[in-house]
Image (spheres, rainbow, N blue to C red):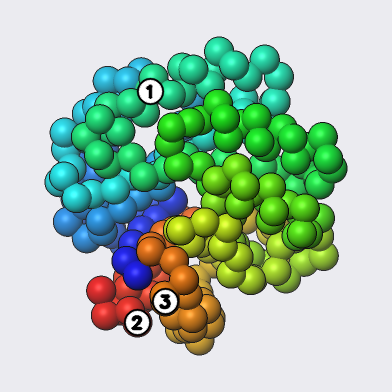
């Protein structure tokens, strides 16, 4: 089982000093990042669909074995209206990464308010079809999705389930490793329960303890022989805590 560990985003100003050299140019952050990690989850695409040249430039900056997962635009996951044209633009935007063999998936993160219903399950399947031929992963925030109907549909439609670690709050997904395809996918958001419902950057202000990371290492170890690959991305990005925890977990796996 191949294990790839990285962070959810990389171009954060508050990583200067804790990860990036203080004087690094923003355009050089990816160059520096790839010297320490071999994968990244690009989250800026959630806010705006970039011109294909933007992702073509990312591809040129990175080594051929560096892998990207791109977060789906908010039109697909949050607005959910007239999605065909934005989906086509999104496919065009990521094509340069795909042509170089570095695009390893699209990750769609739905909000907590997007609860399970038969109609919503059909919508998820529609999103999957719009993102073909690329691997497609879905993160649900609402625990109503943890049911047999969801898993059956995701396996049938080749949708990867995103397992999450977050605060232990009612209505959120528990820290369980769920796999619906050949690749496991984990996002660790931190466990800042006090700030979670308030939103904003402080939601992800959390530094994992080694004991908490070891819980995930044990879960992932149990997948050996069942999946080909595991992506693990840290989204506790406040003040560079994601970098520290990603390195901590990589050491546990001897990576």
Foreground mark, 3 or 1, reads 3
Q: Which residue is painted at 36% across and 28% down in the image?
A: 94
C-alpha separation, residue under disc 3 versus residue under disc 1: 34 Å
Q: Earlier in the sequence, mark 3 or mark 1?
A: 1
Whether tag 1 and tag 2 are in contact, CB under 8 A, the answer is no
Front residue of this view, candidates 168 and 138: 138
Indicate left or right for 112 with 155 as reference: right
Instruction: State how far apart marks 1 and 2 are (Cα).
Output: 35 Å
Q: Position of residue 210 (x, y in %)?
A: 45, 83
Of labels 3 and 2, earlier in sequence is: 3
Q: Which mark is residue 224?
A: 3
Q: Which mark is residue 252?
A: 2
Q: Secondary structure at mark 3?
A: loop
Kindly identify the residue that appears in the image at 82 percent across and 65 percent down.
Answer: 170
- 60 or 15, which lies in front? 60
From this viewpoint, is residue 144 visible? yes
Task: State the image coordinates of residue 250 (x, y, percent, origin top left).
Answer: 32, 73
* On screen, residue 213 above or below 146: below
Which quadrant of the structure image shows residue 166?
bottom right
Q: Nearer the viewer, mark 3 or mark 2?
A: 3
Q: Are marks 3 and 1 in contact (CB under 8 Å)?
A: no
Q: Is residue 174 above or below residue 8?
A: below
Secondary structure under the numbered disc 1 in the rendered image: helix
Residue neighbourhood size for the residue with mark 2, other residues' Cα within 10 Å, grouped as few (<14), some (14–19), many (≥20): few
Residue at (70% x, 69% y) in the render: 174
Q: Which mark is residue 93?
A: 1
Q: CA distance from mark 3 to mark 2?
A: 15 Å
Callout 2: helix, strand or loop? helix
Residue 194 coordinates in the image, percent (x, y): 72, 64
Which residue: 35% across, 50% down? Answer: 40
């Amino acid at each position: 089982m191949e294990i790839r560990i990285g962070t959810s985003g990389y171009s954060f100003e508050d990583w200067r000093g804790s990860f990036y050299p203080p004087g690094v140019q923003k355009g050089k952050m990816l160059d520096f990042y790839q010297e320490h990690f071999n994968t990244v989850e690009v989250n800026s695409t959630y806010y705006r669909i970039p011109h294909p040249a933007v992702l073509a430039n990312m591809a040129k900056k990175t080594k051929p074995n560096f892998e990207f997962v791109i977060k789906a635009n908010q039109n697909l996951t949050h607005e959910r209206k007239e999605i065909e044209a934005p989906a086509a633009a999104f496919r065009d935007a990521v094509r340069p990464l795909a042509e170089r063999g570095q695009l390893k998936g699209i990750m769609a993160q739905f909000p907590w308010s997007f609860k399970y219903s038969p109609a919503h399950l059909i919508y998820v399947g529609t999103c999957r079809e719009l993102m073909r031929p690329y691997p497609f992963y879905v993160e649900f925030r609402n625990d109503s999705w943890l049911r047999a109907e969801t898993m059956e549909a995701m396996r049938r439609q080749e949708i990867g389930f995103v397992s999450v670690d977050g605060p232990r709050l009612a209505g959120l997904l528990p820290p369980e490793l769920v796999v619906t395809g050949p690749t496991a996918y984990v996002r660790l958001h931190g466990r800042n329960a006090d700030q979670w419902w308030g939103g904003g950057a402080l939601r992800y202000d959390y530094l994992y303890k080694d004991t908490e990371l070891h819980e995930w290492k044990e879960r992932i170890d149990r997948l050996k022989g069942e999946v080909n690959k595991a992506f693990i991305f840290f989204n506790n990005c406040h003040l560079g805590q994601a970098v520290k925890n990603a390195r901590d977990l990589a050491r546990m796996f001897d990576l």
